[in-house]
Amino acid sequence: MTSARSPGGEVERQRSAAVRPRDAASVMLLDRQGARVRVLMGKRHSAHVFMPDLYVFPGGRRDAGDHRIGFGSDLHPSVLHALKAVGTRELTDARARALALAGLRELYEEAGIAVGQPAPSATASVPFLPDLEKLRYMARAITPPGHARRFDTRFFALFADEAKIDPTRFLDSRELQDLQWIDVNDSPSLRIPDITAIILADLRSSLDTDPSLSCERAVPLYAARRGRLVRTLL
């Protein structure tokens, strides 16, 4: 008697579990001009394999060339230090900085928002020199095993007024549609991923504790452990 092999579905699940998370970054752009703080969100295109038709913050994976993007100002030392600390190994300054650069590049590509001064060279990968110094490192989340695509995403916060951004000027893109400002204190009626709801709750709590979102702060990491999402502080 021979034993039957696992069906194709089981093989696919095993392949999905073996997918390694790719570095990614997301920017929570905050508007605090009114009585309530708002965050910019948009809907992912229905053609996306990962999280289609869900509302998220602008962001995406880190590209190979992100570490070569010139920048106008560097990360706060505490933010750079926190980004570099990854378990038992440490990222280089360049790789950690590339995560922040990826986030601002994606904010420009998905929402038309440039954070920084115009780049002096027309051949630059983005038409501005990103200003990194006002970014706060807020959270890190790793997509659980079992997904066709997995990301190790770092979430940054940025106040629009500090970055000299006009909150009325943003553009939909092929990647992110129906961009809109969402009150961080309201439960959004939009369809959002579970992890986005968790990050929003963390953001609310952080703003209640310290409205300025100090750069010297413990950063929560969300990762699956034995089938459960576990929160630890970096």
Image (cartoon, grey):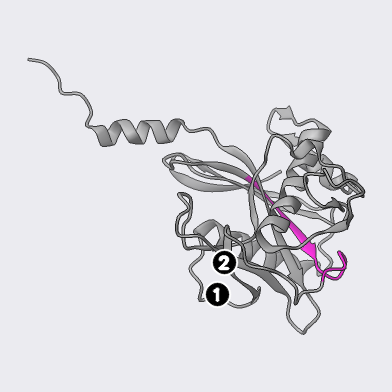
Relative side of 185 to 218, left or right: left
Task: In the displayed orientation, state which residue is furthest to the top.
Answer: 1
Q: Which disc, if any, is residue 168?
A: none
Residue 72 vertical placement versus 108 (above, below): above
Q: Which disc, if any, is residue 188?
A: 1
Which is nearer the eye, 111 or 204?
111
Quarter of the C terminus within the rendering? top right
- Residue 96 among magenta residues: no
**Image location (x, y in percent) of residue 17:** 43, 34
Occupied quadrant, residue 117? bottom right
Residue at 87% across, 68% down: 164
**Image location (x, y in percent) of residue 174:** 57, 59
Residue at 43% across, 41% down: 148
Occupied quadrant, residue 29? bottom right
Q: Earlier in the sequence, mark 2 or mark 1?
A: 2
Label 1 SS: loop
Which is nearer the eye, 189 or 82?
189
- Residue 155 among magenta residues: yes
Residue at 75% across, 53% down: 104
Quarter of the N terminus within the rendering? top left
Magenta span = 153-165
Relative side of 71 to 59, left or right: right
Q: Amino acid at mark 2?
A: Gln
Q: Which residue is mark 2?
A: 177
Q: Amino acid at mark 1?
A: Pro
Which is nearer the eye, 192 or 168?
168
Residue 58 vertical placement versus 74 (above, below): below
